[in-house]
Image: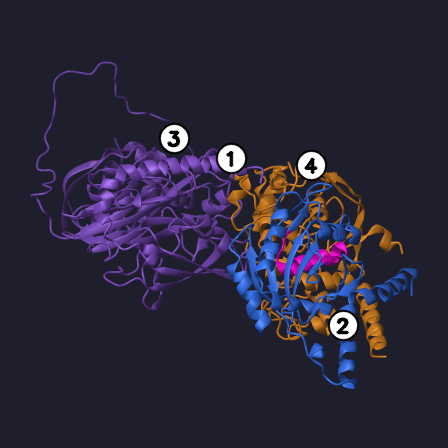
Chain colours: A blue, B purple, C orange
Amino acid sequence: MTMKNLIYILLAAFLFTACNNAEKKETEVENDLAETKVSAENKELPELSIYNLPSTWTTQNGENIQLEDLRGNVLVMVMIYTSCKAACPRLVADMRNIEKQVPEGDLDNVKFIMVSIDPETDTPKRLKEFSIENDMEDDHWLFLRGTPEDTREFATVLAVSYKKISPIDFSHSNIISVFDEEGVLVHQQEGLGVDNTETIQAITTEVSN
Amino acid sequence: MKNSKKTKKGLIVGFFFAALFAGLFSSCEKAVAAKEDPESMKVYGESEAEMTAPPFVPRPVGKRAATKLIVNMEVIEKEMEMSDGVTYVYWTFDGTVPGSFIRTRVGDEIEFHFKNHPDSKLPHNIDLHAVTGPGGGAESSFVAPGHESVFTFKTMNPGLYVYHCATAPVGMHIANGMYGLILVEPEGGLPPVDKEYYVMQGDFYTEGENGERGLQAFSMEKAVNEDADYVVFNGKVGGLTGDNALTAKVGETVRLYVGNGGPNLVSSFHVIGEIFDKVYVEGGAMINENVQTTLIPAGGAAIVEFKVEVPGNLVLVDHSIFRAFNKGALGILKVEGEENPKVFGGKIEEKVYNPGTSVSGVTEEATEGGLSAEMSMAEKMERGKQVYTQNCLACHQATGAGIPNAFPPLASSDYLNKDVHRAIEVVKFGLTGEIQVNGNVYNSAMPKQNISDEDVAAVLTYVYNNWGNNKSEVTQEMVKKVK
Amino acid sequence: MKTLIRLAVCIAVMIQSQAYSQSGSMVEVKGGEFIPLYGTKTEVPVGDFLMDVYPVTNAEFQQFVESNPRWRKSQVKKLFADDNYLRNWKDDLSLGEGMLPNSPVTNVSWYAAKNYCECQGKRLPTVDEWEYVAMANEKQPDARTEKTYNQFILSWYETPDTYKKTIGNTFKNYWGVYDLHGLVWEWTSDFNSVMIGGESRKDSTGDNNLFCGAAAVGATDLMNYAAFMRYAFRGSMKAQYSVKNLGFRCVQDVEKSEL
């Protein structure tokens, strides 16, 4: 065996953990299932659930969470970056408008989530400031930041496109997505300041389910 | 965001003009004000739209109520013939150029299922000019290979509309054949006619020059310069001639739905030997009568109607005439039936005319060129076919069958086979007067063909070695001798 | 324990594939700056990296699904691959009729391609990286102004069924990479950075207030319609899509390879 091959083995061993994370996790879940009683949380995920995505995110409060930790909530998600001066303030306003129209009693079961497409700039500290500036401090507001790679992958699930076009600016699509309690996409609205009746209806329908 | 100001300004100007128009037309608006608003028209039932390949159109809507209409369309990229020996990779709606004809009525709710074949290399979409909405459906229909997108719209305005692909680079998608027509009939349908056909003009840009054989690639450079190699009806040279010719019978009223896909050229649509009794100008509601040539813009359409009173071949052309005779924009509507001398008497006499003066400065001299090298038999056959296609086919037809009572057959022709020198004479100098061919009498005129001796030899060799003739080979020497 | 066994299998498979697979080989691409044909009007930097010499083949992907059952077509999650995933395969582990082991693998989703590369210790190239390498012809690192280069690319866009060819069929470019043009489209890690929607005409009107900083996004050279088509293709993709004419290859950062 040559030196080169040895390196490859080492490399493989090193990388395996990264590439098969998801599978390992599944195995653990299986074991859990065998040993403990089946709780709702451990019910098999629908194939289209975003909780199939294994990734870790940091919140505006500096906590690390798995997407799956959000399971059981209806999610309203949008991708923004805090230094954006053009579309994002309007997207944020759109989110706020939606939030205002969701009945108070439903809000406990809904999370309004802003995912940063600029994780380099949007540190947890910056996200926290942003949430204060925008008066989005209630528990149902969540700001998430991940690795550039996980962010890109997450965007593919939302069918959001974005591109860094200068050191401080991104171009991006303006899509607000609603996910049901199992993490399956149920509704999307595209555009700025568009009629949000259907979005709100989707949220209330999912909450009452 | 930056541009929002500019857009607003544009909108205001737009509104201004809209208001102006509304004012201008308010008087005639009143007349139709009683009609139902298409938006609030109720739809009854659901059906799948009949789709037809050109030159045919689906059945008229007639008196049917507005309905939910399912339209299925598939994008297919495939190599097809552009002209004799010339092929091209067309991008098509439903495998034909133009794409399938879609027929609807005002108030229909269209559910459009737009598919892109898995073999496609590229994403595509469709912008229907009949759609009221962003991009004419372009964004909603954008679809990757092996996928399908579904979008809906309501037909708000009656008329004949172009649809086309609007994916980047837009010009190229259109230049490759991605266009077609959608008809929105008014309530109660268009008045019935005897024959309806679907004709669409398009211009094509190839790396090789017109006629250069083999698979030809698209030339962006020529397209940008609007330097078309082919201008054709229904996707190819000969798309409406020979076996593809349209037909009608004497006494019938013919309606042509004519579109122009472009991408660049505007069509001066004309039918040689007819006058349009009616033209739905630009495919809209305004009807003009007694029109000779109607202008069809790129990305526009017109409906023309005429009653055919006499038999014969009517020739559809873009009257920007070099396009017709040199680039392919030529089609035939074959009208069969009884002669009608009241309408057209034909030639009744021909005599010598000699005013006894001479127009100075013009001396007629036969060109006495030397002989070029004699072609081989195979070369003659190939060259001959081209010469035939360009000079003879329109009258004597692709199979040499001729046209009864008008142009004598060249296939198994006793007249030809009897005397090769006479045949050369006819091609070189023309022929008028009565002749008998295969037992039938013909009395028409064939003009002298302005082609080189070399080409006369080639085309006659081609004719003699086809369609059951006696396989003579004609040489330049023989042609030269006939004087 | 189970995990350990799987680890061993994965390593074994990888050694094997390294041993005989020609497309396991990579070449180094020296980074630099260039102005892509779409998306920006300024120079973008590209770092040094290694790129697979060939696109990933059917045979290689077959091995991958053997050792990674979750990417078999019967087991793949809908979130990660649509119904066209490995569409022409006879079953989970065997290629369909007429498919050659040495042809580029197609009908694979972005997620599958990405994970394949990760399992090799590699990653998908970015759009900029891919375009950077793909602007080379045999002799020059940037042949975009060469007529013959553009014609070659266009002619493959217009040739049907090129995905059936085997790897190594086209020219070896300046960097030593084959088949970037001529066989299949290729996934890129940030394919969804392309802002071409279905309504491409908006892009040239500038009336594009849907996008932040839209003014900066546009083609640098509209005449280069070959590249435009490539970007339009990316713009039409979603990550779960599996397309007959779309394959992939991997790249690797230089530092990582020197581990």
Query: For the view shown, which residue lies furthest in the front direction?
Result: A104
Disc with the residue nearer the chain's start (1 vs 3): 1
Question: Which residue does the numbered mark 4 point to in the structure image?
Answer: C42
Residue shown at the point (55%, 53%) measured from the top left? B122
Identified by mark 3, the residue type is Leu
Do pointers 1 and 2 mark residues of a single chain? Answer: no
Please name which of the two marks, 1 or 2, marks the residue nearer to the observer.
Answer: 1
Do pointers 1 and 4 mark residues of a single chain? Answer: no
Q: Residues within 10 Å of mark 4 (few under 14, many from 20)?
A: some
Identified by mark 4, the residue type is Thr
Tell me if label 2 and label 3 are in contact, CB under 8 Å: no
Alpha carbon of mark 1 to alpha carbon of mark 3: how far? 69 Å
Do pointers 2 and 3 mark residues of a single chain? Answer: no
SS class of the residue under badge 4?
loop
Is B27 placed above or below B257 here?
Answer: above
> Which chain is indicated by disc 2?
A
Question: Which residue does the numbered mark 3 point to in the structure image?
Answer: B371
Residue shown at the point (12%, 40%) measured from the top left? B346
Identified by mark 2, the residue type is Glu
Alpha carbon of mark 1 to alpha carbon of mark 2: how far? 53 Å
Question: Which residue does the numbered mark 1 point to in the structure image?
Answer: B6
> Which chain is indicated by disc 1?
B
